[in-house]
Each structure stands twice: as C-alpha cells, then as structure tokens.
C-alpha cells in the first residue's frame, strides 16, 4: 500500500503552525512545545500535500514510500468486462464526439463502484491521487481504479460515499483557512448544499477513456472550451429545445459538479473547475467540463452529428461577420 514519510526541516521552519492547521485529517500533525510540527500519526497520511503546499518556507516534505505494487484485493475475484459490442459502441461514441467537436481530450467514463460490487480488473496507481488528478490522466488515456486508500483527497472520498468526512471538512473550517470563503457560516452552507452519497455506499472510483472502459459508466465527462461545451449542450436540446439548469460554484468541481449532479439528477451539468482541480492538475485556464449521464449519450452523438452538418461549421466560420475591407 502507498505509505508516506513526512520530513521536517527545523532550520527552515518558522513555527507558524500552518501545516498543523491545514492538514485535513486531525491527529497526523501536532504542534510541539517549541511550536514546530510533530508527526503523531503518519499512517493516517493520504499524501494530499496540503500541509507542505501551505508551508511558507517549504520546511515540510511528503514522500511516498513502501511497496507501491501491493494490491490488498489481489485474491478477490474481479468483475467481468462489458461485452465487445458495448465496448465498440462506446468507442464509436468517443470517435464521433471528438471528430464533430474537435476535442483535444478523450471523454472520460466515470464509474462509482457499489460497496457490494466486484472491482473491475484495472490497475491501481502506485501513489495516491486526487480524483481530479485521476480524471486528468484518464482524458489522456489512462485507466485508473482507486479504492479509498488510493485517494489523496478526503473531501472526494467522503462526497462519493466511500468514507466519512473529517471534521475540518464537515464544518468548512479548512475552506476559511484557504481564504476561499469569508467565514465559517458561509463555508458550512457550501458544505451543506453540496450533494453526497451515503457513507460506505461505494468502495472505489474507476475512470477511463470512454473507448477503453471495461464497465458501464454512470457518467461521461467532457473536457473542452466553453464553445465546445455550448455544442454539447445544444446536442441534447436539438430534438426538444429543452433548456438546462446547471449547478456550478467553483467548489468540488470534478466530484460534485461533473459527476454527482449528473448521476443523481439524471441531467447534464457544467463546471468551471475548482481551486483544487486547477491547483493540482495541468488544466488550462481556457478549459471547463461537462458531465453527461451515460443514458443521454445516444442523444449527444445524434445531436452533434446533425449540428456538424451546418451549424457548427457556420458558427466557426463567422458567417455573420462582414469581411474587413
């Protein structure tokens, strides 16, 4: 299993206490008699780098150690993959969406594995990742299975119903520390308004390019420009004219806005990204995301195919803009 070594350099440390305050899991770090951090429970560390990232002098470092190849589920039978016919259908959906929209990144199939469900036969990462980091790797072609002990963000694992939520996250205290919300009242409201799955209802997340998934996903997440998200939205309105009500806040982007809202509401949802996913990944400033329930993908594919016959090219060719003389 992934384990972590927390190293402290007393010569750099200014005893500000920020590392102890920012650690989202109580009990890992404590403040010593001289004000310097003391590692009290290193086994509880998930490698989120929040403490080291907020150290003004970089006096704290987090290093992954141990046997990264260890698989606690090695003796457990794995789920059968989806049929070749279904895999080809998903691959066809991916080809059409990428071609019609000119997408750079592959659509991501997202699966939340039920607590009583067999795990798919997919590798786990050698080091813990945030869910958003796994998503960014999947858009490039990686397939990643992550039980809770492979997640480095306790916010994500609690939102997805894999674990309970640490107190600092439940109260919103850590959001105030990050200066992302004005006070505890605003932070508590943000936490209370976001959807979550019941605790211990899920046992793992699985993400992969849509064309490579071995399990039927609950949600497909697209990464692209605002213009590409517009066409995705229009593809789902093409046959009905339906307007969508989107939920976006800048908080918990990948887990709540791109995945849970589409999963729970059975409607697409856009998200602009969030502090965490932008600080922890290579997402560009011009990128945003849309989560689409898998059941709506046939409509997306059909709608994009029709829009690409005229509307998309006309718009991109700026047909209403007069030539400059």
Image (tube, helix red, strand yellow):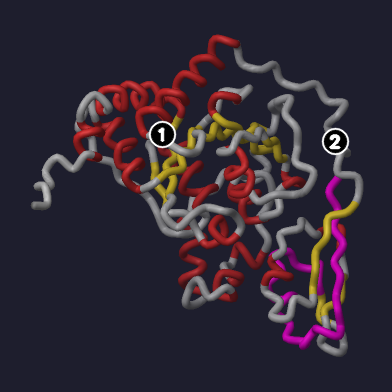
Q: Is residue 264 visible?
A: no
Residue 322 spot, x, y in % from top left: 9, 47
Name the quadrant containing residue 277: bottom right
Residue 2 magenta-drawn? yes
Q: Nearer the viewer, mark 2 or mark 1?
A: 2
Residue 68 spot, x, y in % from top left: 86, 44
Looking at marks 2 and 1 on the same chain, the residue that comes earlier in the sequence is marked by 2
Q: Residue furthest right?
A: 66
SS of the residue under disc 2: loop
Which one is in front, 151 or 27? 151
Q: Residues within 10 Å of mark 2 (few under 14, many from 20)?
A: few
**Vertical placement of 97 versus 149: above or below?**
above
Disc 2 target residue: 71
Disc 1 target residue: 266
Residue 98 magenta-drawn? no
Distance of mark 2 from mark 1, alpha carbons? 34 Å
Which one is in front, 215 or 176? 215
Quadrant holding the N terminus: top right
Residue 8 spot, x, y in % from top left: 85, 75
Rendered image: mark on residue 251: none
- The residue that appears at 75% across and 46% down in the rendered structure is 150
- The residue that appears at 25% across and 40% down in the rendered structure is 316
The magenta region covers: 1-29
């Amino acid at each position: 299993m992934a384990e972590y070594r927390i190293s402290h350099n007393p010569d750099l440390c200014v005893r500000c206490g920020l590392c102890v305050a920012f650690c989202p899991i109580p009990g890992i770090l404590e403040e010593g008699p001289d004000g310097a951090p003391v590692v009290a429970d290193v086994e509880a560390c998930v490698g989120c780098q929040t403490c080291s990232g907020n150290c003004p002098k970089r006096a704290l470092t987090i290093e992954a150690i141990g046997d990264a190849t260890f698989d606690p589920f090695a003796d457990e039978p794995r789920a059968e993959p989806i049929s070749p016919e279904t895999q080809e259908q998903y691959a066809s959906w991916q080809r059409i969406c990428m071609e019609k929209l000119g997408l750079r990144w592959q659509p991501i199939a997202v699966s939340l594995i039920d607590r009583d469900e067999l795990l798919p036969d997919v590798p786990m990462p050698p080091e813990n990742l945030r869910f958003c980091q796994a998503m960014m790797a999947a858009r490039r072609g990686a397939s990643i299975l992550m039980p809770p002990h492979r997640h480095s963000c306790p916010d994500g694992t609690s939102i997805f119903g894999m674990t309970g939520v640490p107190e600092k996250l439940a109260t919103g205290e850590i959001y105030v520390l990050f200066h992302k919300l004005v006070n505890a009242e605003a932070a508590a409201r943000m936490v209370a308004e976001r959807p979550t799955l019941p605790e211990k209802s899920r046992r793992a997340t699985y993400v992969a390019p849509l064309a490579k998934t071995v399990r039927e996903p609950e949600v497909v997440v697209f990464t692209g420009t605002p213009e590409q998200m517009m066409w995705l939205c229009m593809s789902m309105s093409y046959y009905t004219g339906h307007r969508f009500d989107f939920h976006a806040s800048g908080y918990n982007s990948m887990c709540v806005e791109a995945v849970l809202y589409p999963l729970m509401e059975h409607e697409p949802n856009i998200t602009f990204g969030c502090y965490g996913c932008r600080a922890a990944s290579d997402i560009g400033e011009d990128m945003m995301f849309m989560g689409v329930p898998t059941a709506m993908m046939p409509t997306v594919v059909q709608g994009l195919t029709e829009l690409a016959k005229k509307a998309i090219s006309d718009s991109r060719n700026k047909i209403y803009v007069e030539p400059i003389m």
